[in-house]
Image (cartoon, rainbow, N blue to C red):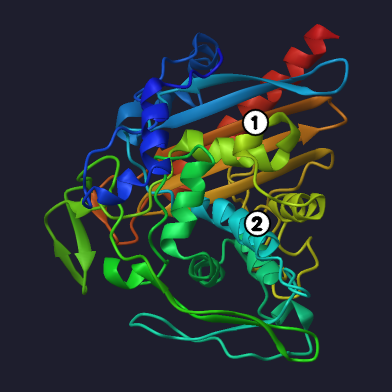
């Protein structure tokens, strides 16, 4: 079934474009992208037919499962047509997006370089970063012998997409600035999204302040300088107050009250699925929702969404610490011993934090003539305590995502064979 585009989302987009969202205080309950979507009978049946998936699917409320399965069919001109199937998709059900936010930040950083139109400024330009407010750290200008260790937008993107590096994300968040980052996502049709935090122990005020940057040419001369920036007013939060669990760990002690996610990053599963799709299929994306990226930018993003850490040749990420399945949750379950299936290629972005596991992926197998998209999130925190590091990632979450990816892949193989 095709996904509807609710009236509430149009209202929210209109408010954001008019700048009216800035007038809402933090925690204001603004309408989100959608309420819970109707479940697809096909996907529901597929999930419940597998004994490996049923223990989780049968308790989907407890595990806060959400799934999007998108079938892709090519027409006579090889243009993709998408049919989406949902299971418990609900933008009002908050989950911590964790590193899923790295894909829109990577795309917007490349877009910003294009929009600056500074002679000589590219994604490979070396940079330095200053510190102008609390919780900011500086990055000096330096050119090490290993080009992979030079601080550039390109290398930050590689680090984010290959191994989900948090420091690299922080730097590009700072390059974009909190308000410009969010306003650009709203204008692209994601008005419910909020990316408002570094991955660092900074308070909400410090996260509104972002660092000064300087970019250099090959001779070490400054070619572009960006001053420190501040978002003068907090952003509203679409879901209002959000709390999870029965307690959380802080300072080595358990605080027995729910953990507050109200001012955390917020990126619904539908939004990040659409963002990945727009990166992979820009020509099939409405012009108003396309990033302002060159063909080379798109190729660059796709390369590192697909590559494994050491398979990329990036010198910092060698085996055995960084293995093939390090950032492949669906199908491979992040299993260090998983052997890559030669003809199967997965382009994806993942998240792992606070008991939440998420993977948003595009699968393509030319040998089987199969391609589809699959997005999923699951919450595994049996004791209800957050920040204690005691989550069932390895025993429940990752095996579920692996089985889910394998189940849908096998279904696609049989579906394609049946239509030949």
3D distance between C-alphas at marks 2 and 1? 17 Å
Which residue corresponds to mark 2?
Answer: 111
> In screen coordinates, is 159 left or right of 417?
left
Instruction: Classify the position of the C terminus by image quarter.
Output: top right
Q: Quadrant of residue 42?
A: top right
Residue to which mark 1 is pinned: 286
In the displayed structure, would residue 212 be above or below residue 32?
A: below
* Residue 264 image offset from top left, x and y in percent: 32, 55
How many numbered discs, if any? 2
Q: Residues within 10 Å of mark 2 (few under 14, many from 20)?
A: some
Relative to 152, say whether 217 is above or below. below
- Residue at horizontal 49 percent and vertical 13 percent from the top: 40
Residue drawn at the location 78% of the way across and 62% of the way down: 312
Q: Residue at x 85, y 23 (%)?
A: 78
Residue with the most extreme front position: 18
Q: Secondary structure at mark 2?
A: helix
Crowdedness of circle 1 by 10 Å Cα count: few (<14), some, many (20+)?
A: few
Q: Please indicate whether residue 225 sits to the left or right of residue 241 in the image.
A: right
Is 420 rendered above or below residue 89?
above
Where is residue 129 shown, x and y percent of the image? Answer: 54, 83
Q: In the image, what residue occupies the spot 79% across and 8% down?
A: 418
Image spot of residue 215 (x, y percent): 66, 81
Q: Is residue 82 above or below residue 349?
A: above
**Can the viewer see residue 203?**
no
Helix or strand or loop: what does disc 1 sit on?
loop
What quarter of the picture does the N terminus occupy?
top right
- What's the mark number on residue 101? none
Q: Is residue 231 visible?
A: yes
Image position, residue 248 (x, y; %): 21, 59
Mark 2 or mark 1, earlier in chain = 2
């Amino acid at each position: 079934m095709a996904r509807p585009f609710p009236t509430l989302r149009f209202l929210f987009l209109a408010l954001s474009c008019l700048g009216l969202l800035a007038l809402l205080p933090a925690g204001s309950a603004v309408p989100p992208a959608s309420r819970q979507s109707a479940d697809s009978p096909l996907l529901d049946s597929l999930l419940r037919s597998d004994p490996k998936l049923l223990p989780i699917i049968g308790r989907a409320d407890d595990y806060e499962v959400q799934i999007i399965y998108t079938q892709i069919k090519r027409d006579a001109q090889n243009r993709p047509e998408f049919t989406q199937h949902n299971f418990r998709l609900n933008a009002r059900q908050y989950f911590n997006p964790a590193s899923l936010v790295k894909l829109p930040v990577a795309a917007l950083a490349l877009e910003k370089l294009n929009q600056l139109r500074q002679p000589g400024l590219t994604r490979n330009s070396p940079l330095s970063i200053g510190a102008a407010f609390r919780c900011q750290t500086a990055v000096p200008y330096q050119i090490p012998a290993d080009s992979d260790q030079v601080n550039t937008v390109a290398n930050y993107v590689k680090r984010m997409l290959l191994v989900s590096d948090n420091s690299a994300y922080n730097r590009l968040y700072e390059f974009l600035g909190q308000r410009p980052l969010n306003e650009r996502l709203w204008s692209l049709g994601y008005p419910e999204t909020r990316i408002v935090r570094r991955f660092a122990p900074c308070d909400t005020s410090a996260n509104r302040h972002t660092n000064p940057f300087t970019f250099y040419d090959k001779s070490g001369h400054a070619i572009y300088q960006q001053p420190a920036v501040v978002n003068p007013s907090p952003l509203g939060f679409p879901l209002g107050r959000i709390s999870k669990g029965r307690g959380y760990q802080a300072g080595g002690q358990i605080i027995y009250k729910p953990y507050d996610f109200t001012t955390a990053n917020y990126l619904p599963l539908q939004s990040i699925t659409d963002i990945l799709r727009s990166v992979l299929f820009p020509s099939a994306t409405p012009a108003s929702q396309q990033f302002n990226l060159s063909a080379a930018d798109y190729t660059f993003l796709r390369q590192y969404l697909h590559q494994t850490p050491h398979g990329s040749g990036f010198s910092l990420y060698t085996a055995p610490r960084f293995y093939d399945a390090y950032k492949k949750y669906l199908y491979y379950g992040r299993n260090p011993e998983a052997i890559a299936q030669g003809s199967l290629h997965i382009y994806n972005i993942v998240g792992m934090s606070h008991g939440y596991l998420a993977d948003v992926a595009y699968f393509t197998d030319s040998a089987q003539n199969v391609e589809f998209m699959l997005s999923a999130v699951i919450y595994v925190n049996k004791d209800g305590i957050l920040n204690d590091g005691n989550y069932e990632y390895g025993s429940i979450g990752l095996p579920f995502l692996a089985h889910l990816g394998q189940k849908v892949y096998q279904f696609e193989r049989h579906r394609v064979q049946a239509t030949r």
